[in-house]
Amino acid sequence: MELTVYLSGEIHTDWRAELAEACDGLDIHFTAPVTDHAASDDCGVAVFGPEDSKVWHDRKGALLNAIRTRTLIEEADVVVIRFGEKYRQWNAAFDAGYAAALGTPLIVLHSPEHAHALKEVDAAAQAVAETPAQVADALRYVMTGRLPG
């Protein structure tokens, strides 16, 4: 079995690399948004030209990023969404809703402290994990039928 797994959400830690390392040996193709914050913010004006207003600057970038995000979510077999500790990931909440609307299996990753705030997002998911290692164990089980350990 092979899977394409889209990794959405928090970009300020190395959780994606940690997850990929924990999935070593599995036939998984990982995709993700652009995680270079400056590039993600400035892509619209870099491609389509400058804006006088920061609102329109940000909107151009958001719309261009949405093309990438939607395309990769639509191509994914599973979507993993990480909600981090420090920053609000509003785009990740959209990604969760989009994946759920498409019927794409969803694994949500966040600390126990965010369980109440994310209860509706968690309710849309097939699994809720607290660590990248748990996500890797879940993917390994889905792909091989083997329990961790």
Image (tube, rainbow, N blue to C red):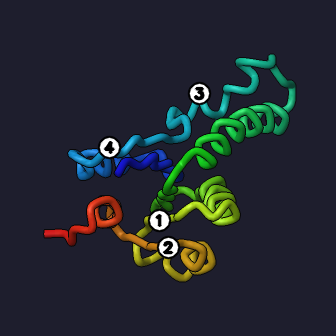
Q: Provide the residue designation for mark 2.
A: 126
What separation in Å lies between label 1 and label 3 (alpha carbons)? 27 Å
What separation in Å lies between label 3 and label 2 (alpha carbons)? 32 Å
Residue 36 percent location from the top left of the image: 51, 32
Mark 2 belongs to which amino acid? Answer: Gln
Q: Earlier in the sequence, mark 4 or mark 1?
A: 4
Q: Residue at x 48, y 40 (%)?
A: 31
Disc number for residue 107:
1
Q: Earlier in the sequence, mark 1 or mark 3?
A: 3
Q: Residue at x 49, y 79 (%)?
A: 115
| Category of crowding for the residue at label 1, using alpha-carbon neighbours closer than 10 angstroms: few (below 14), some (14–19), many (at least 20) | many
Q: Is residue 91 above or below residue 59?
A: below
How many numbered dots are placed on residues in this image?
4
Q: Secondary structure at mark 2?
A: loop
Q: Residue furthest front?
A: 1
Q: Provide the residue designation for mark 4.
A: 17
Q: Residue furthest left?
A: 149
Q: Residue at x 26, y 50 (%)?
A: 23
Whether residues under marks 4 and 2 lie with C-beta atoms below 8 angstroms apart, the answer is: no
Residue 148 percent location from the top left of the image: 19, 69
Judged by depth in the image, the label closer to the viewer, 3 or 2, is 2
Mark 3 belongs to which amino acid? Answer: Ala
Q: Is residue 86 left or right of residue 98?
A: left
Judged by depth in the image, the label closer to the viewer, 1 or 3, is 1
Mark 4 belongs to which amino acid? Answer: Ala
